[in-house]
Image (cartoon, rainbow, N blue to C red):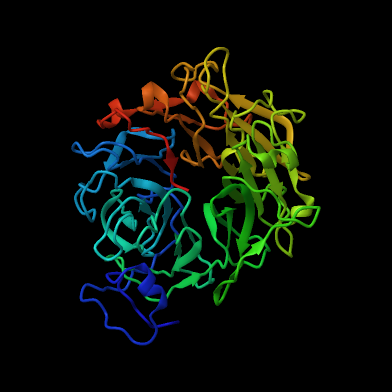
Amino acid sequence: MNKHRKAWGAGLAAAMTVTGAVVLPAAYAEPAEATAPAARQDFNGDGYEDLAVSASLGTVNGKTRAGYVAVLYGSATGLKTSTRQVFTQNSAGIPGSAETGDQFGSALTTADLDKDGFADLIVGVGGEDTADGGTNSGLVEVIWGSAKGLSGGASIGPGGEGDQLGAQGHLAVADVDGDGATDVLTVENQHDLAVTRGPFARDGSVFNQGQVVVDKYDSRVLDLAVGDLNGDGITDVAATENDGDEFDSRRVVYWYGTSQGLTPYTLVYDVDGAGLQGGESLDIGDVNKDGYDDIVVGRAVDGYDSDLDTYLAKGGRIAWIPGTKDGPDGVAATFFNQDREGVPGTAEKWDGFGTDVQVADVDGDGYEDVVTGVPGEDLGSRADAGAIVTLRGTAKGLSGTGSRTVTQNSAEVPGTAEKGDTFGRALHLGDTNGDGLADLAVGSPGENAGAGLVTFFLSGVSGVNTPGKAVAVGNSLLGTVATGARLGSGFAR
């Protein structure tokens, strides 16, 4: 084990590049060894996954766009609204203070960083100005899990000038070197992948020197996801990117995890030998249950020149890229939009099909399914009311057969589909009642003129459209400022 230990007070970039012996911070304490692995999103260790949702544009104590994060805890009957918590940078034990434009909750993820058996909540503060990093350097913080839930926190580290560390799509967790400790993944300079190696002490300091994988091109990371892409037992990382300011040129890249850390990235190629046209969101999971994780990419934004050369681009599309022992196979990729057989709806410009794709088994058949938002879907005269669509995983890969859709007009779903609700703008899948099926949370940040709403569905053998079990959570229940909050803009990944 590398015995270097480094506090984050000097900033993220410094900690990534310093070598040799360093002085231990006075507050340093070695992390506890867990007696059992923590569930990925179980903050209180009761065996049920919990839900963290952000309103990074929410107003806190009069500070607009300061941001907040709401947490609901799982139980045998699903999420419990009675045990909700709301965190801001004004909450006890959370570093910093709520300031205009901080965007606390710009990205969220979860992991047991201190190895105490409880999942912790990692929060991006993409608009934070810091003394070390300067304007919009951004910040990543952790709120610690315990038997009583989340409380207290620490700063993991600030970015550099303009990094917007912890911005949307720029935060993930994985053990990328196979040492048994969870590492935190962020993005520097909009394109360089930075690894903060765990385990973490309760003051946010770490044992090991980190890693920065420099991208030699002027790329922009749009989203990150993690999984084992080649079946070697070490977690890999994938991203969607675009070329600098050319948003139209989107691609899919991945970095292999090894005992020495991440390799330089590899581009996913298509059948023509060019880089496969990527998108804005992605997730990773084993859709065909062959033992290799697959990449699922959502290309929700259409209307660009590249649509002419992109199969099924109209209205947004999903690409399923199968995993193999040699990694992702872009040549064998399969594509879907709302004009594919079995997929509900009709492909129309700017529907946003492929928004915030999520992968998990929602019907209990052993194959991981794909749920996508369609926030630009028009329902009658109600423009951008929104919808979600589930595509089924099978032994042959992702399939349109048996796909199902849910909107706020579906029977017994709370609320009513209205213009601009953007139901499906953000999604989350997690087993909140312990039945082995992934349940669905749907964000509608446009609800009630931008106040936002979260709708939660328990899954069954027919999938996520069991509307009689749906509940809705808004700012009134949380006791937060509704105006412009856009609750449901993002969930912990």
Does residue 398 appear in the picture of this structure? Answer: no
On the image, the x and y values in percent for residue 130 come to: 26, 59
Locate residue 141: give its quadrant. bottom left
Please indicate whether residue 216 sits to the left or right of residue 138 in the image.
Answer: right
Which residue lies most toward the right here? 272
Q: How many marks?
A: 0
Name the quarter where the N terminus is drawn: bottom left
Task: Please tell me which residue lies in front, 488 or 317.
Answer: 317
**At 54% across and 61% down in the image, what residue appears?**
218
Which residue lies most toward the bottom here? 20
**At 37% across and 76% down in the image, what residue appears?**
207
Please indicate whether residue 9 sits to the left or right of residue 3 in the image.
Answer: left
Please indicate whether residue 252 sits to the left or right of residue 208 in the image.
Answer: right
**At 46% across and 53% down in the image, what residue appears?**
40
**At 43% across and 51% down in the image, what residue appears?**
109
Please indicate whether residue 421 sits to the left or right of residue 146 in the image.
Answer: right
Vertical side of 358 occupied by 155: above or below: below
Vertical side of 210 occupied by 294: above or below: above
Vertical side of 254 occupied by 317: above or below: above
Locate residue 26: give its quadrant. bottom left
On the image, the x and y values in percent for residue 42 come to: 41, 49
On the image, the x and y values in percent for residue 18 come to: 38, 80
Task: Please tell me which residue lies in front, 332 or 280.
Answer: 280
Which residue lies most toward the top here? 381
Task: Please tell me which residue lies in front, 217 or 78.
Answer: 217
